Structures are given as structure tokens and as C-alpha cells.
Amino acid sequence: MTCRPRDRLWLRWLHGQTRGFPVSENKHETVAAVVVTYNRKELLRQCLGGILAQTRPVDAIYVVDNASTDGTDQMIAAEYADRVIYERLPENTGGAAGFHHGMKRAYEDGHDWIWVMDDDAEPQPHCLEYLLKHAGPDVGYLAPLILGGDGRLQSYHHKRLSKRLFTSEVSPARWQCWRTGVPSSPVRIDANAFVGPLINARFLSSVGLPNAGFFITWDDTEFTYRLSRRGKCFLIPEAIIVHKDSQVGAVPRGGGPRMYYSYRNQVLFVRLVDGHFASWLCAAHLLASMVCHGLRRLLTTRSATRPTDTTPTPPESRWHGSALVLLRALLDGVLNRCGPWHVKTAGKR
């Protein structure tokens, strides 16, 4: 199929009229689904059910199990032994390493497209069919529209990144969905969560694989942003995937491992994209934001507490622990230190 001239395509993009993108001329390209799971066999069952129900069947399904202890291996053996390629890792290496491993396996097996998702995702029946309608050799990845289990749009998973990466993960004013709701045609994006993007395997030889050192969080943003610098990447609104997570797009707080990874990996991402100096600016911005949040929380708690109020005030040790985790995360980020939480602290995931 002959593409429209670049200038006309750009004008159509400005007006949001991006239908008619070239469709892959190779009707026999293979698609492999890669699912990473950890101790969520019921969600995994629903995820695999969604993949197996596609109107355009996948050619292979790879399930990478991060050493689950909830009987995931028995469930796979009993229900999906002849339908999935199952690999149980010897230890929990985090989602980042799981996707690294699964995508590497699918790429080495010669598949043309790799459809990646967490175990809490369930693609709707026409999802893959609609994604492949927009496939082409110059497309880096195609992402389905992500809806929560309540049917609400999770627009924060589809990212148009701010030019000043050190101040924000994403600039909402630059993202169409925040202003006008669900788009009616394909939208160019910079980064996307690992919730259903269909990745063109041709680019992996030059772009590489997800950074296993991120462990969890930001590994998807870093990889898909890296891919978007080489190929055209789009959100395809007609392709729907349901994401049954409990997250609301906010940065975790409270001093736990997820808070550590969220802050450290954001700084790591900025360091990889914009360099060492930008990572220091990012760390300073995050530290200032955390201090302001703590002060607001403290003032709000004190003003709301009355002599007859028996609600306990958060102990100082909680804020002290959060501060230590934050400082360690920011320092590890600017110094380019990767790896899992338990290597760096006495805590356990």
C-alpha cells in the first residue's frame, strides 16, 4: 500500500485524522504474546482466557513466572500445558527482568510482533485484530486503549512526555485524553505501560530489551520511550484492554519498596534520556515535592486534630522511614545504581 505524502499525513495528524495508516503487507507475520506473572494465578487465568479468545489468534503464548508460590505452575500444567510456553524463573527478578526474559525468548524464536502484558490485563476479543490493522514496517509499537476494571479510562498509562523530563513523568496538558476524553482515531504517543502494547520485533536488534535492573515500575516507560525514538508509536483507541490493577497513577508513599523503585527509577530514566546533570535536577525536584507534601500533611493533620479527637497522628518514625527511603532512592538513581530492593536495604519485598 502506498503511503500518503509526509506533509499531508502531518496535516491530518494536526487535525486528529490519522486513520488510513498503512497496513502490513505481510499477511503471515507471527504474533507472540508475552505475559509476566507473580502470585496471581486467578488474574493470569483471566488474562490467558482473553488472549485465547482473540478473533485473530496469536501464534504463541509465553508465560514467564517470577517464582510464584500460589500454585501457578500446577494451574498452567493442568489447564494450559499444550497452549502456552511456560517458564518458571528460579527467583523473583521483578517484572522488568521478566519482560526482558520473555521478549528475548520470543525474539529468538523468530516472531515478528511481540504482544506484552502483565497478568492483570485482559484484552477484549478484537484487540489484536484492531492493532494489526495499523501494523507496518516503520511502526515501533501499537498500544490498545487501557480501561480499568470499572470501565474508566486509565489515560496515565499512555504518555506524551514533557520536554522537561526532570519535573514530571508526563505533562497532562500535552495529552489529548485529559482534555477531550477518549480519542476517536490513532494518537501518536511517546511511552506506554506494559499493558498490551504490540511491539515490532524488527526494532529490538537496534533498540534492545527492557532494562532488567529497574525491577518494577518505569521499566515500561523507559523501554517504550526508547522505542518511540526509532519507530512510530500509536495508541489505537478501537483496540481495548482491561487493566485490573489497584493503582490510580499516584506515586506510592509510606517508605516501602514500591516507593523506592518509583523514585529511583524515575531518576534513572531521566539520567538515561537527558544525562547526569538532568538526573540531579530531577532528584532535587522530587525531594522538594516530597518535603512540601510532608509539610502539607503535617499541617493538615494538626489543624484537623482536636482535644476530643482520638484519631492517632502518624508517628514521626513513619515520616523518618519514608525520608530515608526517598534519599536512598534518589541517590541510587543519580549514581545509576540498579537492582532489587533487598540488595540495598534490610527490607524485604
Image: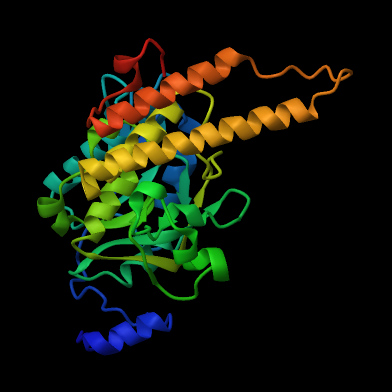
Q: Nearer the viewer, residue 336 or 189?
A: 336
Which of the 4 image quarters holds residue 80? top left
x and y percent of residue 57 in the render?
34, 58
Residue at 54% over, 25% down? 254
Name the quarter where the C terminus is drawn.
Answer: top left
Which of the 4 image quarters holds residue 258? top left
Q: Nearer the viewer, residue 146 or 332?
A: 332
Name the quarter where the N terminus is drawn.
Answer: bottom left
Residue at 57% over, 35% down? 293
Whether residue 53 is visible:
no
- Quick check: 323 left or right of 152? left
Residue at 26% over, 48% down? 223
Color style of the picture: rainbow
Which of the 4 image quarters holds residue 191? bottom left
Q: Nearer the viewer, residue 119 or 254?
A: 254
x and y percent of residue 159 in the render?
40, 57
x and y percent of residue 299 in the render?
69, 30
